[in-house]
Amino acid sequence: MSAETRAGTGAPYDAELGALFAARGAARVDVPIIQPADPYLDTAGEALRRRIFLTRGEAGETLCLRPDFTIPVCRDHVGQGATLPRRYSYVGLVFRQRPTGPGEFYQAGIEDLGEENAATADARALADALAGLETCGLDADDLDLVLGDQGLFEAFLRALGLPEGWQRRLVRTFGHDDQLEAALAALARGGSGALDTLDPEFAELARLGERGALTFKIRERMEAAGLPPHSGRSPGEVAARLIEKVAIAEARLSEDSLQLLRRFLAIDARLSEAGAVIGDLAGAAGLDLGRALTFFETRNLALRAAGVELATVRYRAAFGRPIDYYTGLVFEARRKGSDEPLAGGGRYDRLLSILGAERPVPAVGFSLWLDRIASRTGDAA
Amino acid sequence: MTLTLAIPSKGRLKDKAVAALAGAGIHVASAEDSRSYRTSVTGAPGLEVLLLSASEIARELRDGAIDFGITGEDLIRETIAEPEQVVETVARLGFGHADVVVAVPEAWVDVETMEDLNDVAGGYRARHGRRLRVATKYWRLTQSFFTRRNGIQSYRIVESLGATEGTPAAGSADVIVDITSTGSTLTANHLKILTDGVILRSEACLVRSLVGQAPGTAEADELAARFRQPPPG
């Protein structure tokens, strides 16, 4: 690699990707390397704690070396109150503790905020990621490309008419194959014993749906414990969830629903054929996936319009990223036969609200792992 | 060569540790001034016994600054990221029993299991504008049990170095992860242990550092052998 292309941040492909992102209308931003850790722990969860470089400031605030760009870019956007829609691009170092390999590496990517046409924005994110990889010398032929969609999974659960508590439980495990399998097994087994430790008086009130009386008794308990009345779970919230829990405690997932869910989750098809495969499964079972399937097909049209060859992308129904701000599309590109992502992205419509935006902001983005790309292409300096 | 072994510096743990050493023929006498941290040892030539705080013992074993230590398994697992690679548990000593548990307010009548807690945590921000907060001094044990064992992603750990069981009533946390031996402190604070919420059943252990100066020496092996359970029969 020549010295010119490493100018600026020192990242591989900095100049080439910078030109590509500019040509695609994504303004280059820079964010400080040292970031407050709370937004990361709040959004990505405590599991991140052992993977980031944490330190404490003089005043006791928790700081970290940025483990990604998405959160600081979005925080900056919220802080500046910039108008929407808007596309940001970045190239730079991120820092993560890993059992092997260096703790710092380069990423580049685009965050696409506020585009109301989700199909267009999703398609643009995937197309831009592929264009980025191509800029780094990787063709679609070199890659395994996988796409998943949590929205379709949620629609499938709704269409099956599963109790809401079960839907929440299954959605939480989406993207974690073993946890999803364990949840399915538990639901199929049924909840025998789930109420064994419950005070019979509460169980009876819950069975009768006596929300008022339950709320009263729970409030008594909270007051006896001195729990602060206006922070944390309210008596009514506990009562409502108990009623819901008791209602489904004796139920179990029917064999039919279980089989349908398993068949849905097993779908692994070319994106060009996925819509038909999903439609056939739902149609044969009399399930209406509603707008989720329409959106899936609309996005495929948008992808084609953005120049993505659908037959080169695999749709895997069980593919997801178990982070609770991811809401729809997720995708990953790997070198054929490898398990290391070279590019990954997805839709995160909940993130900006969490970071303080006044109203929900539709958002989608991707990042490229430049060091992996450089070492794979044998192009590293 | 000199081997170092650290025991807790005060209280019942110290007394029981001294008794455990005596059971292996190692007699430790504190200096005459009971506030001193110096000891004299008979029954094990070349062994130096140090008095340290229980959590410091775990750190010193991790760093290889001492060869052996008697401390709680909870502190070993909390202090050391990969305990199996850094230390070896020579013997479980049968005292200092305590469980590290997940406890929630008794008034949460709908929450009995970790799966219930997972559900509550998942919807917490949408309802309350923040994550479910877990007060604990065991962030490593908590994170591993919540996330790896039970798939709970959405919660925040609030560091608590004392009176953890009071944090729900104080409004600084929603649930706790803490150590309990009889459960009476939890009950007094209107908290209950989840049915599958026992993270660790801890007790005092004699632990050997695998990263210190003397991990492979004959002296160290010999000392460890004095504590191992005799084979049955």
Image (tube, rainbow, N blue to C red):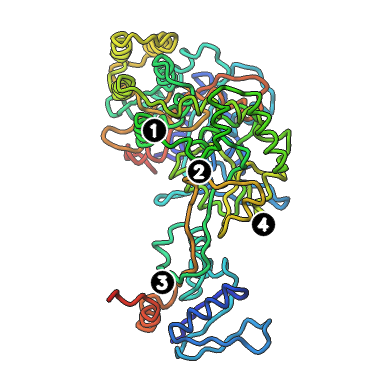
Residue type (three-letter) at the residue carrying disc 1: Ala
Q: Is residue A8 visible?
A: no
> Which label sits on residue B162?
4
Q: Are marks 1 and 4 on the same chain?
A: no
Asked if badges 3 and 2 are on one and the same chain, I answer no
For the residues tagged 2 and 4, is the chain the same? no
Chain of the residue where label 2 is placed in the rendered structure:
A
For residue B1, side relative to residue A32 (left or right): left
Label 2: few (<14), some (14–19) or many (≥20) C-alpha neighbours in 10 Å: many
Q: Residue at x 46, y 70 (%)?
A: B94
- Structural distance between the alpha carbons of marks 3 and 2: 32 Å
Pointer 1 chain: A
Comparing B162 with B105, the one in front is B105
Could you say which quadrant of the image residue B215 lies in?
Answer: bottom left
Q: Residue tagged by mark 1? A: A183
Element marked by disc 2 = helix
Q: CA distance from mark 4 to mark 3?
A: 29 Å
Q: Position of residue B54 (x, y in %)?
A: 57, 69
Give the labeled residue for mark 3. B91
Chain letter for mark 4, please. B
Q: What amino acid is labelled 2 in the image?
A: Ala
What amino acid type is highlighted by mark number 3? Ala
Whether B144 is drawn above or below B36: the answer is above
What secondary structure is marked by label 3? strand
Helix, strand or loop under label 4: loop
Residue B136 visible? The answer is: yes
Q: Looking at the picture, which amino acid does disc 4 mark?
A: Gly
The Cα atoms of the two marked residues, 2 and 4, are separated by 24 Å
Residue B101 x, y percent position in the rendering: 53, 51
- Disc ID at residue A47: 2
